[in-house]
Image: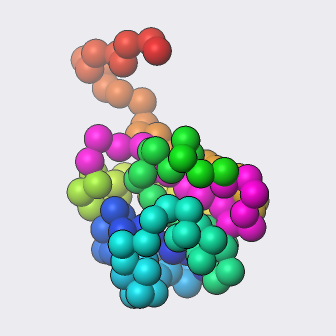
């Protein structure tokens, strides 16, 4: 699978996707490109965009493009914080469909951690 790491995703996470062709936005020369243009450019060359940009799904109609988007839901984009989410990313890769957006959440909170308030 051809995976594009968004600018906000640490490039070290590429090591967590063995067997996949992984490039970064910067490597592609697309640094600073706005989300809409980035998705259109990426759709021609990649199967999936991996991002931590939670606003992307509210700003862009991802269903209209032939690329899947995986959003890592995290309080930080630090590689050590995101790495534990990568097994879930690897699990979803074989079943992603173009035009779909997938959200990857951290595992359940420890028992002594307060629950998130309901929306």
- Height in image: 95 above or below 1? above
Asked whether residue 15 is in view, the answer is: no
Asked whether 36 or 87 is in front, the reply is 36
Asked whether 14 or 70 is in front, the reply is 70
Q: Residue 76 vs residue 97: left or right? A: left
Q: Does the magenta stretch include residue 65?
A: yes
Residue at the spot 54% in from the left edge and 47% down from the top edge: 59
- Height in image: 37 above or below 82? below
Q: At which x and y percent is residue 17?
A: 49, 73
Q: Give the range drawn in magenta.
A: 62-76
Question: Exactly how many numbered labels are in the figure?
Answer: 0
Q: Residue 1 vs residue 32: left or right? A: right
Toward the top, the furthest residue is 118
Q: At which x and y percent is residue 79?
A: 27, 61
The quadrant of the image that shows the N terminus is bottom right
Residue at the spot 55% in from the left edge and 55% down from the top edge: 70
Asked whether residue 17 is in view, the answer is: yes
Q: Is residue 43 magenta?
A: no
Quadrant of res 48: bottom right
Q: Residue 97 vs residue 7: left or right? A: right
Quadrant of res 90: bottom right
Q: At which x and y percent is residue 29?
A: 41, 87
Residue at the spot 42% in from the left edge and 30% down from the top edge: 108
Q: Residue 11 vs residue 33: left or right? A: left
What colour-coding does the image apply?
rainbow
Q: At which x and y percent is residue 40?
A: 63, 71
């Amino acid at each position: 699978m051809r995976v594009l790491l968004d600018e906000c995703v640490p490039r070290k996470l590429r090591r967590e996707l063995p067997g996949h062709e992984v490039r970064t936005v910067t490597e592609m020369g697309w640094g600073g490109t706005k989300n809409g243009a980035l998705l259109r450019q990426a759709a021609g060359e990649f199967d999936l965009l991996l991002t931590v940009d939670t606003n992307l799904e509210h700003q862009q109609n991802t269903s209209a493009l032939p690329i899947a988007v995986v959003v890592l839901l995290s309080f930080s984009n630090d590689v050590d914080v995101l790495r534990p989410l990568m097994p879930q990313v690897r699990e979803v890769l074989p079943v992603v469909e173009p035009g779909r957006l997938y959200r990857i959440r951290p595992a359940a909170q420890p028992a002594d951690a307060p629950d998130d308030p309901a929306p």
